[in-house]
DNA sequence: ACCTGAACACCGTTCAAGT
DNA sequence: ACCTGAACACCGTTCAAGT
């Protein structure tokens, strides 16, 4: 089968998802596609464009799948959760956002911002509100990406949280009282629920704003 | 002068700040310190530890400088602004957080969480609240890092925002109505104020929560 | 204990040469 | 127009050898 940008990007995503970011090189990618590494450059300008296309593909897919709900608030929760799940399944996308987000970032802004417009809030505040939601989502995504890198291949949620909590209690409790208190809750908290609690906090703030 | 981990980390920070992330290699760092690249490995395990120490140094410095204010809310704003300014001056730190945050992340959690404890909110919710604030801060930091990479060396704020706004309006307004509306505001908005508006939104949500 | 600097095993990217 | 694969200019990291 002939090479194409789409085929290359899809193969890259497979490698990134299965073996992690460090496994993606033009050599491994070319080998997987049964071609030479130079051939890829006919379809893709460079590695950054490859990652941008991969991230964009993932994000576009998620946002297309999210169904609009009864209220803007519910829709925002649905979009946020869809992104959370996708970025957890593809942690390299979360890390990518600190590099060169481009179109993927615009898609997220558009999706969230469109729902913010549906809330009855003044137009001049809509950008601030959407920005708060989007940056919060990306912050969580970045941390999930970091965690995925620190404990690669960790599947068992409980073991994973216990490992993170362990690193949080390795320091002196006198120096880090809050972190120690939080570590206890960390062990049996639900990432997804905590993420949603943050979204609700921002939505509550929006609802209350003058 | 003899080599030491501190001297190495400080020299690394200087290179990162002045010439960007791509300029930091063990060869350039060794040359700057007048030594061989292998010598650095006697003091630093690898590049990741070098970046971790650099990020930790920056974050610890900022948090130590932030004065506690009259109210926890004011203190949280001060910490957040301190981090915003520092991460804007050192964008590589913001990008680093999507990699292996370690102690720098704990410092931020402790600093923010300590103030959240001062708010009169139930203990079981404090972790969620601190998490929302920290992730929001890191999300903004990550985007600032990405922007710094996209428009390297850009000093003029107006030109910078105009450049970002241009990329936001390059797509069809029919496909991206919200992004187009936001681009107009983007041109003359204040990053720092918008960042603070997000913090206030979360604080308002916390104040309102049951 | 600490430093040197060459060597190793990689990268992303280019490019003459092929079809 | 598209692909090959060797070559180039780098990396991070290691390690025998020095002091």
Image (tube, coloured by chain):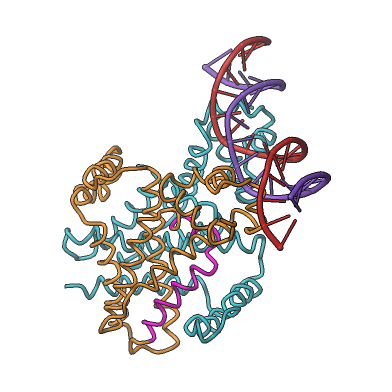
Chain colours: A cyan, B orange, C red, D purple
Q: Which x, y percent locates residue A59?
A: 45, 50
Is residue B209 rendered magenta in the image? no
Left or right of A183? Residue A155 is: right
Of residue A26 and residue A127, the one placed in the foreground of this image is A26
Q: Which quadrant is the C terminus of chain A positioned in?
A: bottom left
User: Which residue does the image show at 52% across and 64% down from the upper left?
Assistant: B101
A155 up-or-down from B73: above or below: above
Main SS class of the magenta portion in the image: helix
User: Which residue does the image show at 36% across and 65% down from the upper left?
Assistant: B83
Q: Which x, y percent locates residue A133?
A: 34, 63
Would you say residue A18 is visible in this rendering? no
Of residue B67 and residue A61, the one placed in the foreground of this image is B67
Q: Which x, y percent locates residue B98?
A: 50, 58
B183 up-or-down from B106: above or below: above
| Magenta range | B94-117
Is residue B111 rendered magenta in the image? yes
The picture quadrant where one finds residue A122 is: bottom left
The picture quadrant where one finds residue A199 is: bottom left
């Amino acid at each position: 089968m002939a090479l194409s940008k789409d085929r290359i990007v899809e193969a890259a995503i497979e490698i990134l998802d299965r073996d992690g970011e460090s496994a993606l090189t033009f050599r491994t990618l070319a080998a997987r596609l049964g071609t030479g590494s130079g051939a890829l450059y006919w379809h893709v300008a460079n590695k950054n464009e490859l990652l941008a296309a991969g991230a964009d593909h993932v994000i576009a897919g998620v946002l297309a799948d999210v169904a609009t709900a009864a209220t803007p608030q519910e829709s925002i929760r649905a979009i946020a959760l869809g992104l959370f799940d996708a970025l957890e399944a593809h942690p390299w996308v979360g890390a990518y956002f600190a590099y060169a987000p481009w179109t993927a970032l615009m898609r997220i802004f558009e999706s969230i911002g469109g729902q913010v417009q549906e809330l009855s809030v003044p137009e001049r505040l809509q950008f601030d509100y959407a920005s708060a939601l989007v940056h919060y989502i990306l912050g969580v995504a970045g941390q999930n990406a970091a965690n995925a890198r620190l404990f690669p291949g960790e599947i068992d949620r409980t073991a994973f949280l216990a490992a993170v909590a362990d690193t949080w209690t390795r320091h002196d409790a006198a120096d880090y009282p809050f972190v120690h208190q939080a570590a206890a809750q960390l062990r049996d908290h639900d990432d997804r629920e905590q993420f949603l609690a943050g979204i609700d906090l921002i939505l509550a703030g929006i609802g209350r704003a003058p």
